[in-house]
């Protein structure tokens, strides 16, 4: 605010100086024009008879006829005065500069007492005069009236400019104070969030500030969600490890006959604890709605996963199909998108036949992604069960049973849903629905004019 006041003051001083110089130049122009008029009047009264100038005793302007009137006239010939107006008493001035006939010379001069005058001179020839030296007409006017006008203008100018500057500074300070008031309230609310007095920023702020408020609320929710996820993951980890630890505590290692059996039990429980830890780690770091940054391009992730799974399931002839909107981005980074898409496509390869189809569309304010296979599908009533940790679609298949649970956690953390339906291919269809606002939060894609959603079955 101090910088704004200084800039305003400097600008006003500069503007005042420019106005003063302009006014002073206009005053000088007016003085020159006034002296020209006086000069024309003087020359008009002069006659030339018998080789001499004839000038009336009384001139038209009464100031030429009064002492100390401030308006003086002199005619010189060959550098010597040949006539003076009655207003000239004893004033002594420097000789006017020589000039070409018809050339006006305007300057400021001083008399012997130090008074300043504006002086205008011109050299004139008379046709009847055969002399080679012209007559020099000189008119002088005291500059005090003009200086008084300049000073009066300066005083008025600086008073008004000073008042305007003070008023403008007060106005600027007032507007800045008013403009920063929402930010002071925002800082107070942020302090309340930091100290735990409130959960989010609740007040309504001006339109220009609301984007900042919304981003801060998302950041606070993001941080709170992450802390809650870490807390829950640690609690679940501790709870999940109780059973394997209890089994380990019950091992009987005294009898050599049971060592082989106990060793197998030990390996199983260690493997189970490793699976539990891996699951909780993935769950803890799984994606939440992104606050900023670019989301992963779904088509690129599909192409990467299809190449990998073609090699992994080389014992099957898998035909991968896609119907993904070009440029569609997910509200996650590459790692989380690969985690979701990879688990779903891997399950489709495991439990399906020979066809896997991935679709991606936007419709109805949602991002919709479907992964389908041509396998036997999911039994009615098992849809919710297989999304739980440790449950596999087919117990005969290898795996830990945590992949779908991790997918469900990532989707749920993004305020989305994961449902299992019947695919038009004959098998299962895992359908993900995510709010479109997550996509526009990072401005990854322009709003679509409308597109059909990926249907699992028709």
Image (spheres, rainbow, N blue to C red):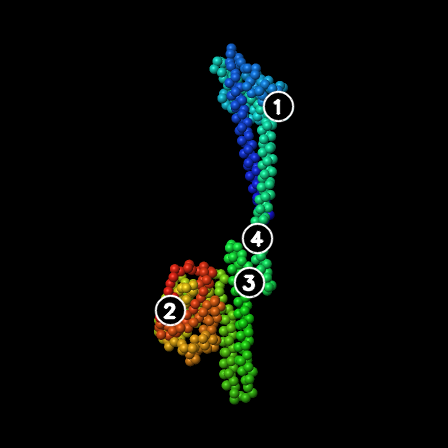
Label 3: which secondary element: loop
Q: Name which quarter of the figure residue 417 lies in.
A: bottom left
In the rendered structure, find residue 111 and report the number of the disc placed on it.
1
Rendered view: 127 above or below 370? above
Q: Which residue is found at the position 54% from the left and 56% from the top?
A: 205
| 272 displayed left or right of 115 | left
Query: Disc 4 and disc 1: Cα gap in Å?
Result: 63 Å
Q: How many marks?
A: 4
Q: Earlier in the sequence, mark 1 or mark 3?
A: 1
Query: Disc 2 and disc 4: Cα gap in Å?
Result: 51 Å
Q: Earlier in the sequence, mark 2 or mark 4?
A: 4
Label 4: which secondary element: helix
Q: Which residue is found at the position 60% from the left and 33% from the top?
A: 152
Front: mark 4 or 1 = 4
Query: Disc 3 and disc 4: Cα gap in Å?
Result: 20 Å
Q: Position of residue 376 (x, y in %)?
A: 37, 77
Q: Which residue is mark 2?
A: 455
Which residue is the extreme one toward the top? 50
Q: Which residue is found at the position 45% from the left and 60% from the top?
A: 440
Query: Disc 2 and disc 3: Cα gap in Å?
Result: 38 Å
Which residue is the extreme one toward the right? 113
Q: Position of residue 11 (x, y in %)?
A: 56, 42
Asked if the residues shown at circle 1 and circle 2 are in contact, with their CB atoms under 8 angstroms apart, the answer is no
Front: mark 1 or 2 = 2
Q: Which residue is mark 3?
A: 200
Label 1: which secondary element: loop
């Amino acid at each position: 605010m101090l910088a704004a006041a200084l800039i305003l003051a400097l600008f006003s001083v500069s503007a005042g100086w420019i106005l003063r110089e302009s006014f002073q130049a206009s005053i000088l122009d007016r003085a020159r024009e006034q002296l020209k008029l006086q000069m024309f009047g003087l020359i008009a009264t002069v006659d030339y008879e018998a080789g001499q100038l004839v000038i009336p005793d009384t001139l038209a302007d009464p100031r030429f006829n009064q002492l100390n009137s401030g308006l003086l006239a002199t005619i010189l010939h060959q550098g010597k005065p040949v006539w003076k107006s009655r207003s000239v008493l004893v004033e002594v001035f420097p000789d006017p500069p020589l000039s070409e006939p018809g050339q006006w010379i305007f300057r400021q001069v001083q008399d012997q007492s130090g008074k300043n005058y504006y002086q205008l001179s011109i050299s004139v020839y008379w046709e009847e005069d055969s002399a080679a030296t012209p007559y020099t007409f000189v008119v002088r006017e005291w500059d005090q009236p003009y200086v008084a006008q300049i000073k009066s203008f300066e005083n008025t100018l600086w008073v008004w400019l000073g008042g305007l500057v003070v008023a403008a500074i007060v106005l600027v300070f007032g507007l800045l104070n008013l403009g920063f008031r929402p930010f002071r309230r925002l800082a107070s609310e942020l302090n309340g969030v930091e100290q735990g007095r409130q959960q989010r920023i609740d007040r309504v702020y001006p339109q220009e500030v609301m984007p900042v408020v919304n981003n801060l609320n998302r950041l606070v929710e993001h941080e709170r969600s992450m802390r809650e996820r870490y807390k829950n993951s640690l609690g679940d980890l501790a709870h999940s490890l109780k059973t394997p630890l209890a089994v380990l505590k019950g091992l009987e290692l005294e009898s050599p006959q049971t060592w082989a059996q106990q060793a197998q039990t030990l390996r199983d429980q260690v493997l189970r604890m490793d699976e539990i830890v891996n699951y909780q780690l993935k769950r803890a770091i799984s994606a939440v709605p992104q606050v900023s940054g670019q989301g992963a391009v779904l088509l690129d992730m599909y192409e990467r996963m299809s190449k990998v799974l073609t090699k992994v399931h080389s014992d099957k002839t898998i035909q991968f199909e896609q119907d993904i909107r070009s440029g569609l981005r997910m509200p996650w980074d590459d790692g989380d998108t690969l985690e979701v898409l990879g688990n779903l496509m891997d399950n489709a390869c495991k439990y399906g036949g020979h066809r896997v189809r991935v679709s991606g569309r936007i419709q109805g304010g949602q991002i919709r992604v479907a992964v389908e296979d041509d396998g036997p599908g999911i039994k009615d009533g098992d849809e919710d069960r297989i999304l739980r940790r440790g449950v596999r679609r087919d117990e005969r298949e290898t795996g830990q049973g945590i992949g779908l649970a991790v997918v469900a956690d990532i989707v749920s953390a993004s305020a989305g849903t994961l449902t299992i339906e019947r695919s038009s291919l004959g098998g299962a269809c895992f359908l993900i629905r995510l709010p479109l606002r997550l996509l526009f939060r990072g401005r990854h894609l322009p709003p679509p004019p409308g597109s059909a959603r990926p249907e699992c079955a028709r």
